[in-house]
Image: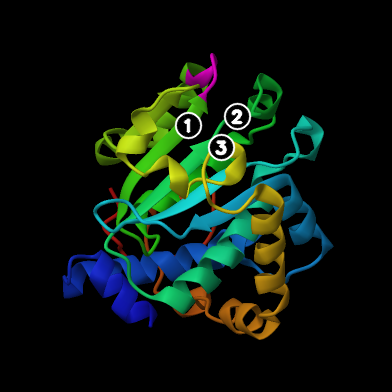
């Protein structure tokens, strides 16, 4: 299934698919805080009670799937980006395994209850790793990143992330001010959760459904944990771009990473 999804995401290029698959599973092996020994436990449950990760059932006009992300718990001290990413990727892997390929993927991030205190808690290395994985080897055709209810400090958030973004990703970032209708050109208002004026389910229902899905699939998570790279089998070589960027020790074959 991974091969088919990657082939689809790489515009059916065999060579690019091989490189992306290699990098994808290399990063799943080396980015241990996100991917090592994952299990749906109290830590993951706490993360998903803090941050809502909800796929919207209504796609965009182009047929792209949309994931809606927002804070559920506005208390900054409970926000941990690393744990949120770890929990999100568990859910995302399950979601993609269930649905297969998508014509495109859009991230909709609701900044409604975000504050500067949340921004201050961002670990920049975690941010860098998330962006690198997303734009280099995540099995999606990323078509847009939309920030809705953008706060007054949105420029500071963008200043943190833009240095790590490729031009192609910078070009698909969109911000929508509070009470702006511009978002609805991408997805109809009725597709949003009830709290955002939509006709979809409310936050609590979406959270509970997500928790139940993960609780019901421990075998899937356990089996996915086994699909990692044995770095000891790599041929030695010069320090890779990964080592330079993230301080990861190991030997890697050439991946032609920009």
* Location of residue 106 with respect to 44 vertically, above or below: above
* Mark carried by residue 196: 3
Please, which residue is most extreme toward the right here?
A: 42
Residue at image x 25%, y 40%?
168
The answer for how far apart the CA atoms under marks 1 and 2 are is 8 Å
Disc with the residue nearer the chain's start (1 vs 2) = 2
Residue under label 1, please give it. Answer: 148
* Nearest the eye: 255 or 59: 59
> What residue sits right under mark 2 in the picture?
112
Q: Picture coordinates of residue 139 (x, y %)?
A: 37, 65
SS at circle 3: helix
**Magenta run includes residue 169:** no
Q: How many numbered discs, if any?
A: 3
**C-beta proximity under 8 Å, tags 3 and 2:** yes
The residue range painted magenta reads 150-154
Who's the residue at 45% across and 60% down the image?
A: 57
| Mark 2 element type | loop
Q: CA distance from mark 1 to mark 3?
A: 10 Å
State the image quarter where residue 17 is shown: bottom left
Could you tell me residue 111's position as x and y percent?
A: 57, 31
Quadrant in the rendering for residue 76: top right
> In the figure, residue 89 lies in which quadrant?
bottom right
| Marked residue nearer the N-terminal end (3 or 2) | 2
Q: Please tell me whether mark 1 sits on a helix, a strand or a loop.
A: strand
Locate residue 8 relative to residue 93 in the image: left or right. left
Note whether residue 74 is visible.
yes
**Mainly helix, strand or loop, the magenta region?**
loop
Task: Give the residue drawn at x 31%, y 71%.
Answer: 6
Foreground of the two, 21 or 84: 84
- Mark whose residue sits in front, 3 or 2: 3
């Amino acid at each position: 299934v991974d091969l088919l999804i990657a082939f689809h995401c790489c515009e059916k290029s065999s060579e690019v698919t091989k490189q992306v698959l290699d990098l994808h599973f290399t990063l799943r092996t080396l980015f241990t805080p996100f991917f090592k020994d994952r299990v749906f436990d109290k830590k993951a449950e706490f993360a998903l009670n803090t941050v809502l990760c909800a796929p919207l059932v209504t796609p965009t006009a182009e047929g792209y799937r949309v994931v809606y992300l927002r804070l559920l718990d506005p208390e900054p001290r409970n926000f941990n980006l690393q744990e949120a990413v770890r929990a999100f990727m568990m859910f995302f892997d399950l979601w993609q395994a269930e649905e297969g390929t998508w014509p495109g993927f859009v991230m909709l991030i609701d900044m409604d209850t975000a504050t500067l205190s949340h921004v201050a808690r961002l670990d920049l290395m975690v941010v860098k790793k998330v962006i690198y994985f997303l734009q280099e080897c995540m099995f999606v055709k990323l078509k847009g990143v939309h920030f809705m209810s953008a706060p007054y400090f949105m420029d500071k958030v963008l200043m943190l992330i833009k240095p790590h973004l490729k031009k192609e990703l910078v070009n698909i970032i969109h911000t929508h001010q509070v009470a702006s209708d511009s978002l609805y050109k991408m997805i109809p208002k009725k597709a949003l959760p009830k709290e955002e004026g939509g006709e979809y389910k409310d936050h609590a229902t979406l959270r509970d459904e997500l928790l139940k899905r993960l609780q019901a699939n421990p075998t899937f998570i356990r089996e996915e944990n086994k699909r990692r790279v044995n770095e000891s089998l790599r041929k030695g070589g010069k320090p890779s771009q990964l080592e330079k960027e993230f301080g990861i020790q190991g030997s890697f074959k050439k991946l032609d990473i920009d």
